[in-house]
Amino acid sequence: MTDTARAVTTIGPPAGTAGPGTLGILQARQFSFWYGEKQALFDIDLDIHARSITAFIGPSGCGKSTFLRSINRLNETILNTRHAGEILLDGTNIYESGTDVVALRQRAGMVFQRWNCFPKSIYDNIAFGPRINGESNRAVLDGIVENALRRAVLWDEVKDRLRQSATGLSGGQQQRLCIARALANDPELLLLDEPCSALDPIATQRIEELLVELKRELTVVIVTHNLQQAARVSDRTAFFFVGQLVEYAPTGQLFTSPQHERTEAYVTGRFG
Amino acid sequence: MVGMADSEPSSKCEVTKRHDPPMTSLPNGGPSKRQRETASRTRKTLRRRRATNAFMVGVLALSAVLATIPLILILYHLLKSGLSSVNVDFFTNTPKPPGETGGGMYNAIVGTLMLVAMASVIGMPVGIGAGLYLAERKGTKLANTVRFLADVLNGLPSIVMGIFAWEFLVKPIGHFSALAGAAALAAMMVPMVTRTTEEMVSLVPTSLREAALALGYSRARTAMTVVLRTATAGIVTGALVAVARIAGETAPLLFTALGNQFTSYALNKPIAALPLQIFNYAVSPYDDWHAQAWAGALVLIALVLIISLAARAATRGRIDLGAD
């Protein structure tokens, strides 16, 4: 963990990349978070690599989701919360005063544990984000919807029923629709909060394949309680315990030779 | 099993032995002493508990019937005394001077419809907006204060609302007016609509809000589009119930709309209203007017009933929860 932190001496996108604003490099610096008086996160330092999948694991209530929801500042909508420290997206502190939260949330798409499609048609669900950006051209919207659905590998299943209600789809399909809805905003970051915990193994497998596919274009961060899932899909894994980041390492390393006792106990199933 | 037993009695015996060991061979020798005592106690109290249950169900059923008796009596009495006066004249004519028979309540029906429509135009946007704020900004100081004040306002006697409207609208302007009446009714409507809207909006799952927020919708835009749309059916119901309530209000109109024996469409002049007309006719000494008052009451209750039915129709599928 500390090695990674030291490696990034200058904040900002590394030289020779496509340029700022399109990378999805995420860095947390001494980030803490409080719900009222209760501190949920303690001085998190974390560098999430662009175009890779990072998994957050750890027991329930240990701050994984809190940290994830701090990345798109969704936690702010909860009353009496506060934070300290910084989270940098492509080198810019997203908590800087003057940051446009709306723009931030378009760059960092989020998928929730329980799929939450709007009670609208499949098409309108996908077009929801682009429309708020002022996109009203029918042909353009059609293209965005098709593209997003194709990226979420849902197109073939729903192309003939785009006008039907999204709530008629199966759970796995609805979750992929939620991913497609986030992709329609063209985010550089995709945050997933236990996206498969309510899905059967087949649907889970499809989402995992989809995530591996997506990491070629964007940075994926996934909170999961399923250790096998973290081992299967992620490139790097962060282990959270009672609000602290205990260990952060390449996934294979974290699961086979964890440096911390607690990590070892957790990944070998001795607690949690 | 039966077929098997008929054809192969010996194999049946074998199966029984393997799978259905008799009770006596339970390893611990049947129910324990404690279990037997509990069973005996249960048998003793069971009869009394059944009787208590039957009695309580009876009491509740009686209460349910009692609750509807006033409505049944009112409807019966209204139909008996008022139906004979409800005719085409009643809906199309204005009142005749005392002594002359006939005439109707066209002016009052028009007045009530105008007053209720105006009150709704003023009251509904304010109430829905306030309710949306209370639900979306739950826990803030302003929201808590407004919620408390809305509850106080909800419990305010309607006559007080009438005096208040007189003080602030009628007195400064110098005369009674339809607008003052509508304002008084709107003031009654706002807290009702506010609270029902808040309740309906609170039922919208947080996950839907977060979905919109995570897609880059602002708080206000999320509330105005996703949340409001999801809660629409419930809000419409609440608004219609409020309309039904104010349609029958008399007290706030006594000092504001005043009433009018003639048909008036002017907003700045006194205007008739069904409840006012019923009140005036009921306290008059003329039998013909009494009959008209009964008819007016019947029409008013029919109006409220229609609005309530519309509210019920809107309630069907009160809230679309999205997932599932």
Image (tube, coloured by chain):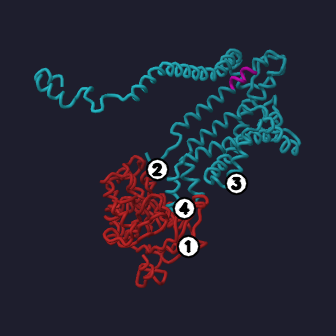
| Label ID, residue B245 | none
Callout 3, which amino acid? Leu
Residue picked out by circle 3: B142
Dots 3 and 2 on the same chain = no
Residue picked out by circle 4: A75
Dots 1 and 3 on the same chain = no
Spatial CA distance of label 4 from label 2 is: 26 Å
Q: Secondary structure at mark 4?
A: helix
The hue used for chain A is red
Give the residue displayed 42% in from the left and 75% down from the top: A1
Callout 4, which amino acid? Asn
Q: Which chain is in cyan here?
A: B
Q: Position of residue B200 (x, y in %)?
A: 58, 44
| Label ID, residue A85 | 1
Spatial CA distance of label 1 from label 2 is: 39 Å
Using the image as rendered, state which of residue A260 and residue B301 is in the foreground: A260
Q: Secondary structure at mark 2?
A: loop
Residue picked out by circle 2: A120
Q: Nearer the viewer, mark 1 or mark 2?
A: 1
Dots 1 and 2 on the same chain = yes
Spatial CA distance of label 3 from label 2 is: 33 Å
